[in-house]
């Protein structure tokens, strides 16, 4: 049977929908809101939050990614998230609270929202819309997955000037594999790296965001960024095999200050890693 061009597109859309890659909902005109501000609200979490844009208040829910819940109001959803990360329910809620903190920090400076006002079915007095959220050149959905703070799940959409849903899905899977290898976020719990603390929330905060600074190594113990072995790099807290490989592939460096140009090393991680190098 020969398909028309329109029929072929319809079949492709149906296949993508069947695979969970794209939504078939009708989409209205896309709108871009720039210089948005986060509005503090108890209902905000890692993937859904109140936003001020062009003088109006909105609630936006990001496409592609689902951050764990911050409480057990939706036990079935939390159970599914726990299964995804191979965590207990208390651990999953701890990751959810960390995701909320991460998003709040990321959105502490102006950001951009792109939306077609697709209904995200919220419970608030305001309607909630699906959206893409970018901080500079960073995509919030990708950031959450890269930090192990969100699962690849939920609505997707075609949007102008963006890669296809299938390509974005591949990108997210790559980021998730790296997060797993580096044992970031929920994957750190799953790997048993934080299994000794009596309280799951204490475990998470102590392992990933300790308020007690790690003592800097002595001058003689610091590594040469251009000569350190794979094993030596992996001995540094916060560096897993994937990140160690990226550092080695990025050589030579003028100095360890250039660690900031390595993918996966943001300002906070750089501040923790820099004292280990000459």
Image: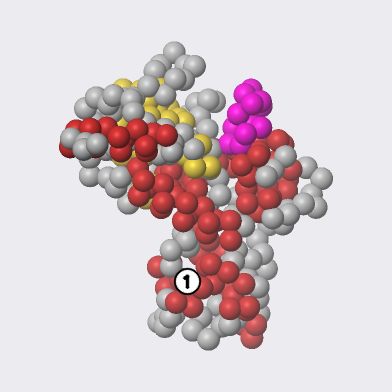
Viewer-closest of 48 and 210: 48
**What residue occupies the far top of the structure in this picture?**
125
In the shown orientation, is residue 136 left or right of residue 94?
A: left
How many residues crowd mark 1 within 10 Å: few (<14), some (14–19), many (20+)? some
Name which residue lies at 48% across and 62% down: 265
Q: Residue furthest left?
A: 5
Placement of 240 over or under 45, stated as above or below: below
Instruction: Compare residues 223 and 180 and report the one nearer the observer.
Output: 180
Q: Is residue 125 above or below residue 183?
A: above
In the displayed structure, does residue 140 sit left or right of residue 196?
left
Taking the magenta stretch, the answer to whether it contains residue 74 is: yes
Give the secondary structure at mark 1.
Answer: helix
Residue range of the region highlighted in magenta in the rendering: 68-81
Q: Is residue 48 visible?
A: yes
Tell me if residue 131 can be seen: no
Image quarter for residue 132? Answer: top left
45 or 109, nearer to the observer: 45
Q: Position of residue 23 (x, y in %)?
A: 37, 31
Screen quadrant of the C terminus:
bottom right
Q: Which residue is mark 1?
A: 246
């Amino acid at each position: 049977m020969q398909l028309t061009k329109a029929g072929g597109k319809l079949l492709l859309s149906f296949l993508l929908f069947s695979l969970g890659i794209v939504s078939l909902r009708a989409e209205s005109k896309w709108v871009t809101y720039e210089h948005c501000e986060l509005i503090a609200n108890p209902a905000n979490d890692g993937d859904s939050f109140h936003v001020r844009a062009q003088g109006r208040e909105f609630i936006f829910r990001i496409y592609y990614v689902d951050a764990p819940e911050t409480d057990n109001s939706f036990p079935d959803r939390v159970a599914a998230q726990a299964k995804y990360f191979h965590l207990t329910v208390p651990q999953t809620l701890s990751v959810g609270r960390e995701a909320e903190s991460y998003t709040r920090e990321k959105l502490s400076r102006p950001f951009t929202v792109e939306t077609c006002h697709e209904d995200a079915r919220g419970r608030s007095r305001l309607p909630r819309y699906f959206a893409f959220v970018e901080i500079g050149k960073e995509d919030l959905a990708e950031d959450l997955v890269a930090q192990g703070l969100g699962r690849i799940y939920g609505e997707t959409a075609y949007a102008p000037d963006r890669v296809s849903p299938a390509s974005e899905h591949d990108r997210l899977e790559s980021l998730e594999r790296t997060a797993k290898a580096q044992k970031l976020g929920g994957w750190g719990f799953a790997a048993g790296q934080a299994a000794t603390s009596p309280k799951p929330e204490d475990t998470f905060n102590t392992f990933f965001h300790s308020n007690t600074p790690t003592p800097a190594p002595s001058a003689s113990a610091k590594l040469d960024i251009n000569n350190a072995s794979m094993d030596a790099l992996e001995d540094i807290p916060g560096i897993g095999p994937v990140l160690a490989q990226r550092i080695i592939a990025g050589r030579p460096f003028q100095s360890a200050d250039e660690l900031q140009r390595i993918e996966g090393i943001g300002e906070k991680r750089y501040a923790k890693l820099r004292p280990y190098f000459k």
